Image (cartoon, helix red, strand yellow):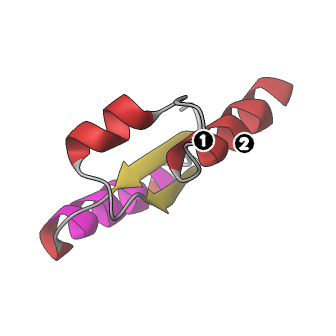
Amino acid sequence: YPEFLVVARGESYRISMAEKFIEKLKNAGGKAELFMANPYSHFEVNNKIGNPGESLITPRLMDFFQKIFKE
């Protein structure tokens, strides 16, 4: 499996689903980590990536890309 960066936000049931997904990936031998994107909405997570001055999701996503493309 490829390495996953799971971005979650919102209510506890959404976060719980993301955590269960990560657990299943890890149990299957995969690598995955959770990134909490609160206070953004789902729309904001998707639309703020790469915007000038955006400091929540873009830096974490760039770190993840740099890590996986080095391997």
Please tell me whether residue 2 is drawn above or below residue 58 in the rendered image: above
- Specify start and end residues of the magenta stretch as a single range: 14-26
Corner quadrant of residue 38: bottom left
At a point 62% along the width and 48% down the height, the residue shown is 60
Q: Amino acid at mark 2?
A: Asp
Q: Is residue 26 visible?
A: yes
Magenta region, main secondary structure: helix
Residue farthest to the top, as pictured: 69
Answer with mark 1 or mark 2, whichever residue precedes in sequence: 1
Q: Amino acid at mark 1?
A: Gly
Where is the C terminus found, in terms of image quarters?
Answer: top right
* Disc 1: which residue: 53
Please tell me whether residue 8 is drawn above or below residue 71 in the rendered image: below
At a point 29% along the width and 60% down the height, the residue shown is 9
Q: Please provide percent x and percent y for residue 31.
A: 59, 49
Q: Please provide percent x and percent y for residue 56.
A: 53, 53
Corner quadrant of residue 70: top right
* Disc 2: which residue: 63
Q: Secondary structure at mark 2?
A: helix
Q: Secondary structure at mark 1?
A: loop
**Residue 50 relative to residue 21: left or right:** right
Q: Please provide percent x and percent y for residue 19.
A: 34, 65
At a point 52% along the width and 41% down the height, the residue shown is 4
Tell me the crowding category of disc 1: few under 14, some 14 to 19, or many 20 or more residues within 10 angstroms, Cα based: few
**1 or 2: mark nearer the eye:** 1
Query: Does the magenta segment cover residue 24?
Result: yes
